[in-house]
Image (cartoon, coloured by chain):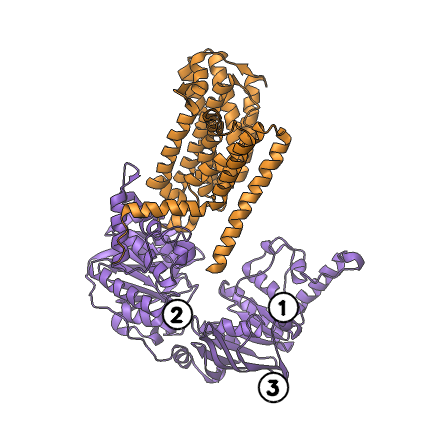
Chain colours: A purple, B orange
Amino acid sequence: MNRIILQMSHIEKRFAGVYALKNIDFQLVLGEVHALLGGNGAGKSTLIKVLGGVHRPDSGTITINGELVEIHHVQDAQRLKIGIIHQEIMLVPQLTVAENIFLGREPSGSMGILNKGTLFSRAKEMLQQLELDIDPYAKVESLTIAQQQLVEIVKAISFDAKILVMDEPTSSLEANEVNILFSTIERLKKQKVSIIYISHKMDEIFKISDRVTVIRDGTYVGMRTTSQTNTDELVSMMVGQKIESFYTRNNKPSDREVLRVEGLTKKGVFENISFSVNKGEVLGFAGLVGAGRSEIMLTVFGADHFDSGHIFLEGEPVTFQSPQQAIRKGVAMVPEERKKQGLVLNNTVAFNLTLPAIRSMAKNLVIDRKRFHDEVRNYIDRLNIVTPSSRQIMLNLSGGNQQKVVVAKWLATKPKLLILDEPTKGIDVGAKKEIYTMIDELSGLGLAIIMISSEMPEVINMCDRVCIVREGRIAARIDKDEISQNTIMHYATGGLS
Amino acid sequence: MKQTNTFSKQSGNLIFNFFKHHLGIFIMILVLSALLSVRTPVFLTSNNLLTVLRQISHNMFLALGMTMVIVLGGIDLSVGALVAMTGTMTVGFIVLQGMPIWLGVILGLVIGTLCGLINGTIIAFFKFPAFIVTLATMNIVRGAAYLYCGGKTTRIVDEAFVGIGTGALGPIPYPVIYMIILIAVFSFLLNRTKLGTYIYAIGGNREAARLSGVPIKSVEIAVFTITGFLASFAGIVLAARMYSGQPSVGDGNEMNAIAACVLGGISMSGGVGSVGGTILGVILIGIINNGLNLLNVSSYWQLVAKGVIILFAVMVDWVKRNRHSSIN
C-alpha cells in the first residue's frame, strides 16, 4: 500500500451553531487522484477551506506525512505544500503567464529590481516540465479558459505543492480541453503529486480518479475504490433517502399550452432546447449547477439573446428583445440571485413590490397612490411578508421574506408564465413551505410555472414533469411518476441510460 | 393586523425621519445661521434672506438635475459649460442675430436640451461611463461657447430679456419663484411618477431593474436630457441677471451642484437620496457663500472654508452611518 500523505480525521465545523461538517474523514495517499463527491451544499467546499486554512475546524485532526499539523492561515497551507485551484480563475488577466505564476514572489535582486530573465526562464522550465504548450510571455487574457486553468496548476506546482486540490476544474471547459487537463493530471501523478479532485460529473470521476469519498449534508457517507464501484452506488450515496414532507401539490395541470420552446440554441451555452409548459403545470428544470438552466430561462425571458430557435407564447411566435417586452406579454421571472438580480436592496418593501407593475399603476406617467398602497398591502398580507412596515428597507428583511417580496412583485403584473430560478435557495424551512404552498396555489389559478431547482426533494414533490439539463442540453424529460432522485442524478451526471 | 397607520401619521414619521437622516446638515445650517446673525446684523434681514434665496436658485436648478443623475448612478460634469453656452448663445441670438426674445430663449433651451440628449444617448447606447462622456462634452460645449462669440462678452439691455432674471413678483425675485416651482415639479417627478421609480431602481440595482422590465436606456436618456434642459434654463436666467452672455461663466458650477447633492445625503453609488436633501445641501452652500461675503472674507479663503465644511458634513454622516451599522 502506498504511503498516506494526508489524513483528516473527525473534522467538524459549525457556523452559527449549525453543522457544516460533521465527523468527516478523508485520506489521501501519495500519487493518487482522490475524488470528493457530494451534492450542492454537501460541504465539499467547506472541507477544502479547512484544508486550505480559510476555516479553522472546531474539532478533528489533520496529519500530513504522519505529522500532526495545524492549518490556521492560507500561508500555513502553502508552507505545508498544499495547493488549491479554485473554480474561478484567479489570475491577473493583464499580466503575462510568467508574471502570474510568480506573482508576489518575483525573483529580484538587491533593491527590489526584478530579474525578468530568470522570471521567464523559470516559468518556461515549469511549463515544459508538464509538457504544456503555453508561451510564458503571453498575456493571460489572450489564453483560453482551459489554458488559464493550466496556468493555475503550474502556479500551484511552483509552490512545490505535493497536495493539489482541484475544485470542479472542468466546469467551464470544452470536451477536448478536459482531455488536456486530464493528461496533465496523469503527468502530475507520475511526479508523485497527490490530487483531491472535486466534481459531480460521474464520467470524469470514473475516468480520472483512483478512489472516491462521498459526503452528504456535511457528513461522511463512505469511501470506495473507483474501479470497484458504479454510478448507481455513488448516486445513492450522494442522495441518501430522506425526503421532507412539507410539500403541497394539490392542483392538476390542464392541457392548454402556454409556452413552447423549439430548438433554442445559444452557441457555447446551450443547444437545441425544446420543451413546453401548460396552464396550471409546474415544469421542473433539474440538473447540476452550471448546466445552463438559468441561461436558458434568462433567454426565454428576453434578458439574453439567442442564436437560433423559436419561442411560442400561447401558440403565437414571440421574440423578446428585453425583459420589458416579455413582462408585457405576461412572462415573469424570479432570478436565482435574489440580492444581485431580484431586489433593489437599499429601497423599501413597497418600492420593490411594485417595481415591475408600476406601469399599470400609473395614469399619464403619474402613479396612482391609492392603487399603489392597496397593492402593497394586498401582497404583504397575501404572501404573509413579515415586515414592520411597507417602508422598511429590504436589506433589513430575512432571506425568506426577501424571497417572498421577489415572488410577490411579479404577481402584480398578472403573469401567465412564472419562471422561478432556485426559488428556495438559502431560505429557512418555514419560508420554503410557504413558497411551496404558493406555487401550488398559483398553478391552481392557471399560471404555468417553470421551476429551476437543484434541490431534489422539491423537484420530486412539486413538479408535474421534469427536464434534466446536462452541459447545455436537455438530457432527459421525465413524467411525474418516474421522477426520483436516482433518475435525476443519473441523467444530470451523465450516467448511461 | 395591527398596522393602523393613517396616512397623516405616516407623513409625520416621514418628516421626523427626514430630520433624523439629515441631522448633520441641519445642525450645520443652524449653527452657521446663529453665528452669522450674531456676527453681522444684516444676515437675518428679509432683504438679505431674499438675496440668499436668489443666489442659491442658480445652484438649485443645476442640483435638481444632478440629484436625478446621481440617484441614477451617474454624474454630469457638463452642466457648468452648458450654462455658459446657452447663456452666450441666447444673448447672441437676440443681440447679434436680431431674433425676437422668445425665439432666442426657446432656441437656447432647445440647444441645451439637445446637448443633454446627446450625453444621455451616448451613455445609454455605448455604455460609456457618464463621467468620461460628460467630461468630453463639458470641454466641447465650453469650447463652443467661446467659439460662438469669439471669446467676447455680449451685452444685452433689453428689459424684456433682462427681466427674466432680475424681475420680481412683489418682493420675491423671479428666480426664487422658478426655484420653488422646479422644486415642486422635481419632488413630484422623483416620488410620484414612473420615471422617478425607475431612476431609483436603476441606481439601486441596475440588473434587478433590467430584469424587472425597467427600460434602462430610455430612462438614462430622459434623465440626462432633463438635466441639459435645467442647465440651459439656469444659463438663460443667469445671463439675464448679468445683462450679458459670457462664455466664461459657470466654471465649476457642476462641482457646486455635486457638493450640494453629497451634503444632502445623496449616495454617489446611486439609488439613495431625495430632493429634500439636495435642498438642504444647496441652502448650506448658499449660507456659507453669503455669510463669508458678509464677513468680508476673501474669496480665496471662501474656497478653503467651503471645502472644510463639505468634508466636515460628510464626516458627520459617516460617523452616524458607522454607528448605525455597528448596532445592526
Q: Earlier in the sequence, mark 3 or mark 2?
A: 3
The quarter of the rendered structure image containing the C terminus of chain A is bottom left
User: Could you tell me the amino acid type at mark 2?
Assistant: Ala
Please tell me whether residue B263 is drawn above or below residue A237 in the rendered image. Answer: above
Q: Is residue A77 above or below residue B122?
A: below
Of residues B49 and B62, the one drawn nearer to the viewer in this rendering: B49
The reply to whether dot 1 and dot 2 touch (C-beta < 8 Å) is: no
**Mark 3 or 1, which is nearer the eye?**
1
Q: Which residue is mark 2?
A: A492
| Discs 3 and 2 carry the same chain letter | yes
Q: Quadrant of residue A118?
A: bottom right
Q: Nearer the viewer, residue A98 or A323?
A: A323
**Separation (CA) of disc 1 from disc 2:** 31 Å
Q: CA distance from mark 3 to mark 1?
A: 23 Å
Q: What is the crowding at mark 3: few (fewer than 14 residues within 10 Å), some, or many (at least 20)?
A: few
> Subunit of mark 3?
A
Question: Residues at marks 3 and 1, common chain?
Answer: yes
- Residue placed furthest toward the right: A110
Q: Secondary structure at mark 3?
A: loop
Q: Secondary structure at mark 1?
A: helix
Residue behind mark 3: A2
Q: Is residue A425 above or below residue A319?
A: below
